[in-house]
Image: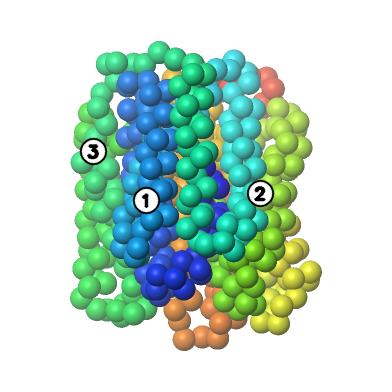
Amino acid sequence: MSNLDLWIVNVAFVDIGKDIGGSVSSLSWVLNAYAVTLAALLVPAGRWGDRIGHRQVFLAGVALFTVASLLCALAPNLGLLVAARVLQAAGAAAQLPTSLGLLMAAVEPERRTHAARQWSAVGALAAVCGPVLGGLLVALDWRWVFIVNVPIGIAAVVLGARMLPHPPAREREPRPDLLGAALLTLGVATLTGALVEAPDWGWTSGRVLGLLALAVAGSTLFVWRCARHAHPILELHLLRVRRFAVANAGTFTFGAGFAIMLLSNSLWCQEVWHYSALRTGLAMAPGPLMVPFVTQWSARLVPRLGLGPFVAAGSLIFGVGLLWRVLNVSVTPSYVTDLLPSMLISGVGVGLALSSFIAAGATALPADRAATASGTLNSGRQIASSLGVAVLVTLLAGSRSVVDQFRDGWWVGIALAVVSAVIGLGLLERRAPAAATARTAVAAETS
């Protein structure tokens, strides 16, 4: 549901604006409110899962996500839609890290890297369905992109209550630091707001400068609290585990570039080429369609080559996909020579890089910290997504031609892809990865 929601809401973006009104900058909060809330709550939710049981928190998260999806569908205006998206993100925050925690507890140590990549591939499968399903649903009404979650959520709660295992909880696990989560929300939301609103308010206006000051203050206080709190949201000492730190940094930069690619292509198809939502979904589908196939194919080589070559190569290939658009884009629709090759190339890059970054982070810590690892990784990815959308919205509000505005966004995505490739080199193995299991590798890194 979480990954499906990402794709279909992007496809529905234009139709939501046509129905309930709002500029691109104000409508971006339909995406950003979700991303910021999810980023702030992922780690606390993972901690609650560690403390009271992954099963309970997972089922509660699915239930909340389902109810919030119905509220999104019923929202009469933009303000209430954004508020419902916040609730939806809270549900997603509870279900995402605990789902990986349940999975890691169910498989043997030597199979956890493969299982984590499979977990990522399931998200990719939802991404395959998302654009087309989103287009079909928007053809009925944009509200159906949220209603579709309701039967899935009900089925997940009913079946999950009967079938999910009961891994032991750590009842002495400390309560998560909610003040830290609030400071993280303040820092990310105000920075996102400054970037989104600066073209309208002016970069030197008092409101933008005030938001930037709040962003700096909130972020600084967040890091200070994490360094001094006994049980912080972000355990800074975990970043001393090289593999975990590299995976988080790479997921962040790649996630920002991915968000730029996703929203820019959706807006380009509907606003410039005047495609319908369904045609836009069909046009974007080949990219995510590549992801599960590439993930499955590369899984055979990971034990021999390690994850480093895949994240480095995948990031560069993703950048090439964006470069194709920079060099071939035209306001005259030319799908076969413009968007289609770009989506296919980008899909290969995502399949190689993103699943490998997530697998590297998920297996860098012991299995009983899998929810914490997943929460930290996905929190960074959501922050990156929010900032990527904000940067794109800022660039699209400029005075340059529409082609140049989109090109600027793609150049930023290319730069982020190159940075991700450089970061990914930190995952290169100094010895054959088959010589040690994931558990041995973690022990070596933490010693």
Which residue occupies 38% across, 73% down? 22
Residue pushed farthest right? 336
Residue 111 seen in the figure: yes
Q: How many marks?
A: 3
Q: Position of residue 143 (x, y in %)?
A: 47, 58
Mark whose residue sits in front, 2 or 3: 2
- Distance of label 2 from label 3 (alpha carbons): 35 Å
- Amino acid bearing label 2: Val
Q: Amino acid at mark 1?
A: Leu
Q: Which label's residue is closer to the chain start, 1 or 2? A: 1
Q: Secondary structure at mark 1?
A: helix
Q: Is residue 374 above or below residue 392?
A: above
Q: Position of residue 255 (x, y in %)?
A: 52, 52
Image height of 106 relative to 407, above or below:
above
Q: Which mark is residue 178?
A: 3
Check the image and report above or below for 416 versus 397: above
For the C terminus, which image quadrant?
A: top left
Q: Residues within 10 Å of mark 2 (few under 14, many from 20)?
A: many
Q: Nearer the viewer, residue 287 or 417?
A: 287
Q: Within 10 Å of the Cα at label 1, are there few (<14), some (14-19), or many (20+) other Cα atoms?
A: many
Residue at point 63%, 21% (across, down): 111
Residue 91: mark in rendering: none
